[in-house]
Image: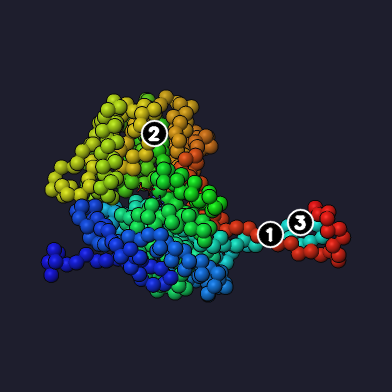
Amino acid sequence: MSELTTPMPKLRMYIDGEWVAPASREYFETVDPFTARPWALVPRGNAEDADRAVRAADRAFREGPWATMHPTVRGKLLYRLGALMEEHADELADLEVRDNGRLLAEMQHQIRYIPNWFYYYAGLADKIEGAVYPCDKPALSFSQPEPLGVCVGIVPWNAPLLLMTFKLAPALAAGNTVVLKPAEHTSATALKAMELVEKAGFPKGVVNVVTGFGPEIGEPLVTHRLVRHIGFTGSTRTGAHLYSLAARDVKRVSLELGGKSPNIVFADAELDNAVRGVVGGIFGATGQTCIAGSRLLVQDRVHDAFVDKLAAFSRQVRVGDPRHPQTQLGPIANRMQYDKIVGYIDVADKEGAHRVLGGGRPPGEECSEGFFIEPTIYTAVNNDMRIAREEVFGPVLSVIPFHDEDEAVGIANDSDFGLAAGVWTGDMRRALLLSRRLQAGSVWINTYRDISYTTPFGGYKMSGIGRENGLEGIREYLQTKAVWLSTAREIANPFVIG
Ligand code: ADP
């Protein structure tokens, strides 16, 4: 059958252990960003589907095997899910690339790494301990950490499986049930992962995936009265909106939002390494990461030489088919984002920044259809320009010179965001002092963009609330119950307590 006559696969949502069509019976197309052509139909979920999924998750939380399952058994299920992901890594990587255009080589690497989250939190599941307090009353007082209930995970399109896992693994390890909503552009891998959830043997309703657009199904999830926690990764604008909705019924939130992270290069750095770190920081994932090192702060003494090296390196970057093993920069993940980045390039030009590299569509047949933008570098950027203050979420770097440590810290911290920062220097005294002074949730010294399941990740200021990963990651999904067991023989005076 030719490609033209093959019908597009119709994806189904996963609710209460069943593969279901949306209540609306409507679907929308998901597009391969390399070809700019649709390849599958995604269920257009609405409030009815949200309600169904939340009720299923609530039932699974209160009744059924999950509610009474010993944490060691929960851990075993999580471990099994990790192992299944490892087994199906190639298949998942392939789907991820088709939906968001990230490099196949990078996705294969990333998806083989993701199971570690499940292994790590599987191990933690039965090590969540309370405490006994040195109580001053005739009582034994102790605490019991408990799950929250139904947790909603709202995930963006830039790293769908990874960012889903950041939420799913600790939420389940803590004993919660989960409703996930992937981004409308990238729903396929979350749904595929549900086949593995099923295979691993999770009881029905413990994990659910609904798909669709933010206002149509995301908001009904966030405002659902049976939901107790919202884990969100995405733009600061949407995050702030969801925060205000969650506040209405005092739901807990973990928000991982935007960034405008400074990557600071001192003259005493190993400059070739720094070039690689800066390139990885802004052109890795085609700049579509919240931690992108989108402001390059370079010490004035080496500014020109460093920019020359950086431009020379970036000029050689191979842009093209994300499945080609030599490609280093793939397409932008969707048309909306492509248009946004093109708009920012126009803004930077008009603001008077000096474009030393890129800015257009790369030449050649390979990049003629997809959403491609060349690696783009601007010098003569002032930290007050929009290109230095707003998140572009694309392969666009703003270079800002500085004279000394104080000035570097001043510029770096002069931002609404505070997600990450990089410092490139040979002087460890300076590195340590800067790591203290920089207002950022992650500070990388002589490296950039490292993340791990072991190490907390999250933002300062408008970059977010709460932490994902590591021990801190599981605390987001727990609440503490204090239990008082009286040792008094009688209640002496019921009106005087304390
Ligand atoms: P972007 O602008 O980069 O697409 P968003 O922050 O808008 O990023 O999207 C991240 C996730 O939030 C996606 O899953 C999206 O569907 C969801 N989302 C967007 N708007 C809302 C909303 N009003 N309520 C709930 N979820 C939303």
Question: Which residue shows up at 22% across the image and 45% down it?
Answer: 372
Foreground residue among 368 and 342:
342
Closest to the camera, between mark 3 and mark 2, is: 2
Is residue 333 shown to the viewer in this render?
A: yes
> Does 242 sit left or right of 189 as displayed?
right
The relative height of residue 9 versus residue 450 in the rendered view (above or below) is below
Q: Position of residue 287 (x, y in %)?
A: 32, 44
> Disc 1 on helix, strand or loop?
strand
Q: Position of residue 226 (x, y in %)?
A: 52, 61
Which amino acid lies under the numbered mark 1 shown in the image of this protein? Ala
Question: Which residue shows up at 63% across the image and 58% down it?
Answer: 480
> Does 362 sit left or right of 425 as displayed?
left
C-alpha separation, residue under disc 3 versus residue under disc 2: 50 Å
Q: How is the image coloured?
A: rainbow
> Does 103 sit left or right of 490 as displayed?
left
Q: Classify 10 Å Cα crowding around label 1: few (below 14), some (14-19), many (20 and above).
A: some
Label 1–label 3 contact, CB within 8 A: no
Q: Quick check: is the Cβ at mark 1 less than 8 Å away from ligand 1? A: no
> Disc 2 on helix, strand or loop?
helix
Is residue 120 shown to the viewer in this render?
A: no
Dot 3 or dot 2, earlier in sequence: 3
- The residue that mark 1 highlights is 482
Q: Classify 10 Å Cα crowding around label 2: few (below 14), some (14-19), many (20 and above).
A: some
Foreground residue among 419 and 477:
477
C-alpha separation, residue under disc 1 versus residue under disc 3: 13 Å
Q: Position of residue 75 (x, y in %)?
A: 51, 68
- The residue that mark 2 highlights is 389
Which amino acid lies under the numbered mark 2 shown in the image of this protein? Arg
